[in-house]
Image (tube, rainbow, N blue to C red):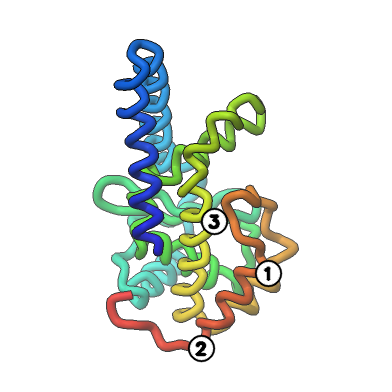
Amino acid sequence: MIALLRAGALLVNVFIFVGIPQELGAPGWAIGTGVTALFLLCRRACRTCPPGTDAPDELHAEASLLAIRMGVKPPAFLRMLPGWTAGAVANRTSYGLLLGTDVEARHRGAVLAHEIAHVKMRDLWWEPLTDGPLRLLIGVARRLPIFYVIVFPFALFGVPLARATELAADEIAARFVPTYPVILQEVASLVPRRESLLYPSLARRIRHAARHSLQEPRKGK
C-alpha cells in the first residue's frame, strides 16, 4: 500500500511540475518554477539537522545496538534537542537521530525505535519527492491561509501516505519493543500536538501497535 501511495504522490507532483507548465505556457512555467523551489526547500529541510548537543556515548551506543537489531546501520550521530521531540535526518550516505532532553529514560528506546523504523522504510529518502512538499505547504499555510488552496493536489496522495508511514513505523517498532503500545499510552499527554491532517490519532496508533507488539520480527522487514 505504501509503495502505491508513494507512486501516486510522485506522479501528482511530477504532473504539477511538468504537466501544468506545458499546458499553460508562461504562467505554467511560473508555477513550475515555484514547485521546483518547493522541492528544493523540502530536500534541504529533510537534510538539515537542528542545532543541539551530542548525546552521551552510552545513549548513542544504545541507539546503535537498537538499529542493528532492527536491521539498519547505526546512526552517524545522535543529537539532543530541548523539549519533548524526536526525529531523524538523512543525507546522501547516512542518517542521524534527534532526541528531546525531556524524553524520559524508560521511553527512549521506543521513541528511537519509531524513528529508526522510518529509516528502515526509507521514508527519509522518499519524503522530498512524495509527501514532503505537502508538509512544507501546511507549515506555510498556517501563517498564510491562502496557501491552503495549493495544498489540495499535494494532499490527494500525501495525506494517506503520511498516515500510512506513521502506522507502519509503529508496527515495526512494536515488534522490537514489546512495551511500545504501553509507552505510547504513557506519553500521550506529553507528545506535542501535530497536524491532524497528516498524523493518525494517537488512540489509533496505540491500537495498531498493540496488534503487532507480540509478533516476532519478520526477516527483511
Q: Nearer the viewer, residue 197 or 67?
A: 197
Tell which circle, 2 or 1, labels the residue nearer the N-terminal end.
1
Taking 71 as reference, is 132 left or right?
right
Q: Residue at x 36, y 74 (%)?
A: 70
Q: Residues under labels 2 and 1: Cα distance?
A: 18 Å
Mark 3 and mark 2: Cα distance apart in space? 25 Å
CB under 8 Å between discs 3 and 1:
no
Name the side, left or right, on which 22 lies relative to 31: left
Kindly identify which residue carries mark 1: 203
- Callout 1 amino acid: Ala
Residue in the picture at 39% in, 35% down: 44
Q: Residue furthest front?
A: 23
Q: Position of residue 144 (x, y in %)?
A: 64, 25
Mark 1, Cα crowd under 10 Å, few <14 / some 14-19 / many 20+, is: few
Crowding at mark 2 (Cα within 10 Å: few <14, some 14-19, many 20+) = some
**Residue placed farthest to the top in the image?**
26
Residue 214 disc label: 2
The numbered mark, 3 or 1, whose residue comes first in the sequence reads 3
